[in-house]
Amino acid sequence: MSAVAQTVSHTVALTARQARQGVRIPVFLVMNLVQPMVWLVLFGQLFRSVVEIPGFAGGSDATYLEFITPGVVMMTAMGGAAWAGTTFVQDMERGVMDRFRASPTSRGALVTATMAWYAMLGSAQALVVLGVAWLSGARFSGGWAGVLLLLVAVVLLSALFAALSDAVALVTRQQEALIGVSQLIILPLMFLSSAIMDTRLAAGWVETAARFNPFDWAVVVGRQALAGVPDPGLVWSRLGLLAAAVVVMTSLAAAAFRTYRRAS
Amino acid sequence: MTATTRWDPAIHVAGLTKTYRSRDREVRALDGIDLEVRPGAVLGLLGPNGAGKSTTVKILATLSEPDAGTARVAGYDVVTQAASVRRAIGYVAQKPVTDPMDTGRENIVLAGRMQGLSSRDAKARAAQLLDRFGLTEAADRLVKTYSGGMARKLDVAVGLVHRPRVLFLDEPTTGLDPEARTEMWAEIARLGADGVTILLTTHYLDEADRLADDLAIVDRGRIVTRGTPDELKDQLHGDGVVVELADAASVARAADVATAVPGVREVVPDGRGLRARATSGATALPALLVALEGAGVSVRSAVLSRPSLDDVYLRHTGRSMAAAERDGVAGAGVAA
C-alpha cells in the first residue's frame, strides 16, 4: 500500500472510532450546543439595538441576530475543536498511544482523524445553530449555496483548531494544557474578531488584530456566505488563508510526535 | 551456505544505553544492555521496578531511542528501520493498550486495520482471536466493563492481530488476581509453543520461572546474569539438602559420611540432622542415602530444596527483589 493510501485508510478507521465514541456519549454533543444557544438567544436579545449604531454592518436592514449567527456558528466550531487533543491525552494515559506508535499507524492519520471528526461535528452543530436562528426569525439571502460555503469555513476552522489541540496534547501530555488553550487562546480570538461586534466600530487596533485572526477569517467567510457573497475577493482570500493555516498546523502537529518520542 | 550458518536472532541488542534527563536530575535507565533471543524462544527480563526492563522494551518497540548501542528486532534496526520493526512486532505495554470506550471487537479490528488488514480480514481475525482468548461473549461490550483479567487478555489479542513474529509483553500479569494470572500464564505458554518469539518483562519470580526458556536478570540498567531458570539456580552450587536422622547420636558420623559423598558440599550438622548443598540434588541425594545406609546411619526423612530465583537475584545483586523494589521506587517514576 502506498503511504498516501495507508494514511487515508488509517484516517477512515480512526475517524470511525472518534465518531462511534462521540455518539456513545451524546451528552457531550448536546452540551456543546448549550453555549451557542445561550449566545444566540441571550446576545441576540441583549444587544438587539447594536445594529442601530451608525455605520454598523448591514445597517438597520439586518437584525443583530442575523449578524451574530455566523459568529456563533464559528465559535461553536472553534470551541469544540479545541478539545480534540483530549483523545490523544486519554490514549497517552493508557497504553493506546504507545500501541499505535509501536505499529505502522500513520502519525498523520491520528491527527487528520481528529480533524475530520471535529469538522463533521462542527458542521452538524452549524446546521443546528442556523436552524435555531432561522426559527428565531433570522433570514439569510445566501440560501443553501451560502450554507454550503459557510460549512467549508466551519470545516477549515475545526481542522485548524483540532490540529492545534493535538499538537498541544502531544507536547504537554496534559488535559490541563487543553483547558489552557480554550481559556487563553479561544477567548481573545473571539473578542478580537467580528463575531459579535463590527470591528470597524471598535478601536483601530482591534480591527487590525482581527485581520490576522484565523477565527475572524472564518467568521468573515461565514457572514459573506450567508449574505450571498457580496465580496467574493474577500471570501476567497480568507478561505485561502484558512487552508494554508490548516496545512501548517497539521504538519506542526505531526512533527509534535517527534517531540513526544524524544521524551519517551 | 557454510557450516557456520546458524539462526539469526529474533532480537539482538548490543551496548544499549539510555539516560533520562529532567531539569534537576539524570537517571541512567540503561547502562549497557546486551541481549540475544533466538526465534521462538521466550525470554524473561526479570528485575524490580525501575531496573530498566520497560525502557529496554520501549526501545525495542521503537517507542524510544537509545543514547548508544544497537538493537535489531526480526532482523531490522529499531532506529533506522523502525517501520519494518513495527510491522513485525506486537507490543503490549505495562498500561492497558485498549480503548475503554470501544468494544473488544472494535479494538481488535482497529488494530488490524492499522496493520494493513482489510476491513473484512480484520473482522475475521478479530472473531478468531476473541474465540481463542475466551472473549467471544464479551466481544461486543465496551472494554470499560471488562474485568482486569479479561482486559489483559484483550491487550494480548490486540498485540497478536497481525501474527507478529516477535511479541513484547511488559508486565503482563501485574495487578491481576491469582486466577486471572494463571489463565494468562496458560495463554503465554501456548503462544510460546506456537513459535512466537516473546520478550516478557516481569518482577514476579514464579512467573519468570514458569514461562521463560531463558532469563536475563536486570538490575540498575545492566544485565547481571543470563541463562535458563535451571542454569541460574544451578549457579548457586546446587540444591539445599536437609536430612533428618532417626538417632541424634549419629549426627557426627553421618556428617563424616556425607562429606565424602561426591557432589555434596558444605555439610553442616543441624540439630538431629544435616544440612548440605549438592551441585545436583537429584543425583546427590540417592548417593547420600545409599552412603548413609551403608554406614549404618538410619534416616528418618530427606528433603531437597531447589534454589529459588530470589536466591539467584540475591546472589547477583546483593539484595533481595523486595529490597530492590523499595530502593527502586525513586527511579521508577522516570523510567516507567
Image (cartoon, coloured by chain):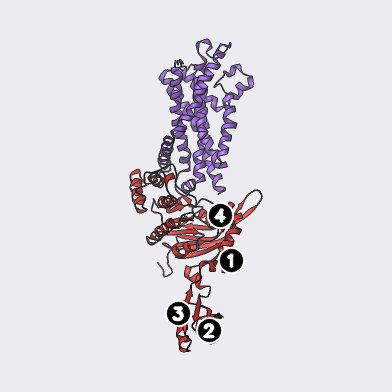
Q: Which amino acid type is shown beneath numbered disc 3? A: Thr
Left or right of B132 in this view: A146: right
Q: Chain of mark 4?
A: B
The numbered mark, 1 or 4, whose residue comes first in the sequence reads 4
Relative to A157, residue B56 above or below? below
Q: Is residue B231 visible?
A: yes
| Viewer-nearest residue: A162 or B265 | B265
Tell me the mark number nearer the camera, choosing from 1 and 4. 1
Pinpoint residue B328: horizontal percent, then vertical percent. 59, 58
Circle 3 residue: B283
* Structural crowding at the residue carrying mark 3, measured as other residues with C-alpha within 10 Å and reported as few (<14), some (14–19) or many (≥20): few
Q: Chain of mark 3?
A: B
Question: Of the numbered discs in the image, which one, if any, rests on residue B248?
Answer: 2
Q: Which chain is red?
A: B
Are discs 2 and 1 less than 8 Å apart at CB? no
Q: Marks 1 and 3: same chain?
A: yes
Question: Of the numbered discs in the image, which one, if any, rests on residue B317?
Answer: 1
Circle 4 residue: B66
